[in-house]
Amino acid sequence: MYTLYIDKPEDFICELSVKNASMKNASARIIIKSDDINLLFEGKIENGKCIVPIKRLKGLLDENVRGKMNLEVIVEDTFFSPWNDDFLTEEHTSIKVKVNETKQSTKPVIEVKVPIKTDKKVMNERKGVNIWLPIHEISKVCNRFNINKSNLKSKKNDFYQIIKEYFKVNPEFNPHKCTILEGLKHSLK
């Protein structure tokens, strides 16, 4: 397989010997055939040496293109095709860069683990659940993250994350979520 470099001009060079004919007015050309394009490059024959300059192919052929390549020679009005081969295009000079980019999340990760304390004096009458405890604990976490009534709209995603994590860790308060959230409205500073 012949390698064609697409980023630099090159000469196709070969030796030719012809019997029973004069090479005085002989001509040569290379034909490059791919699925998308056919190219023809004219050359010359001097002292039995065939030289066909192949121009820079970048823009005409991409890298890793395969196809057929033929040498055609005309001697005394007779056409010959003495050589053909498959070709593959490559870049002679190349630089490959692979960037391994690590993207870090800019969202805060909030983990709330609050042990449940049962103080019978503060128990609500509703099914024996202390709704003031979660209100107080969530308020403390909000204060730690500087979430208050005045900036609640701008920090609503953080607030929702705190609420979500709290009720995930403390599922026994889920039936009273609305009452607890209502109490938080008044508890936040």
Image: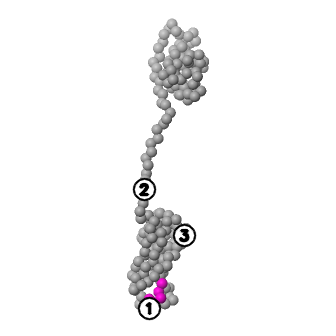
Question: Residue most toward the bottom?
Answer: 20
Could you say where residue 13 lies in the image, as x and y percent from the top left?
41, 77
**In magenta segment, residue 137:** no
Residue 40: numbered disc? none
Which residue carries the number 2 mark? 96
Counting labels gives 3
Q: How far apart are marks 1 and 2 (CA)?
A: 50 Å
- Extreme top residue here? 121
Marks 3 and 2 sit apart, C-alpha to C-alpha, by 27 Å
Q: In this view, does 99 lie above or below 1?
A: above
Give the residue at mark 1. Answer: 22
- Residue positioned 58% across, 21% down in the render: 149
Residue 35 or residue 109, whichever sits in front? 109
Q: Which of marks 3 and 1 is in front?
A: 1
Indicate the amino acid at tag 1.
Ser
Main SS, magenta residues:
loop
Which residues are the magenta region?
23-27
Mark 1 lies on a secondary structure that is: loop
Q: In front: 184, or 147? A: 147
- Which residue does the image show at 48% across and 22% down from the upper left? 144
Above or below, comparing residue 153 to residue 72 in the picture:
above
**As displayed, is residue 49 above or below residue 110?**
below
Residue type, numbered disc 2: Lys
Residue 139: in sight, yes or no?
yes
Q: Position of residue 125 (x, y in %)?
A: 57, 9
Task: Indicate the amino acid at tag 3.
Answer: Ile
Please state the horizontal and vertical placement of residue 87, each as a whole percent of the image: 45, 70
- Residue 25 is covered by the magenta coloring: yes
Q: Tell me if mark 1 has few (under 14), some (14-19) or many (20+) residues whose alpha carbon lies within 10 angstroms of its own.
A: few
Q: Which mark is residue 37?
A: 3
| Disc nearer the start of the sequence (3/1) | 1
- Measured in 3D between alpha carbons, the distance from the residue under mark 3 to the one under mark 1, in whole angstroms, is 34 Å
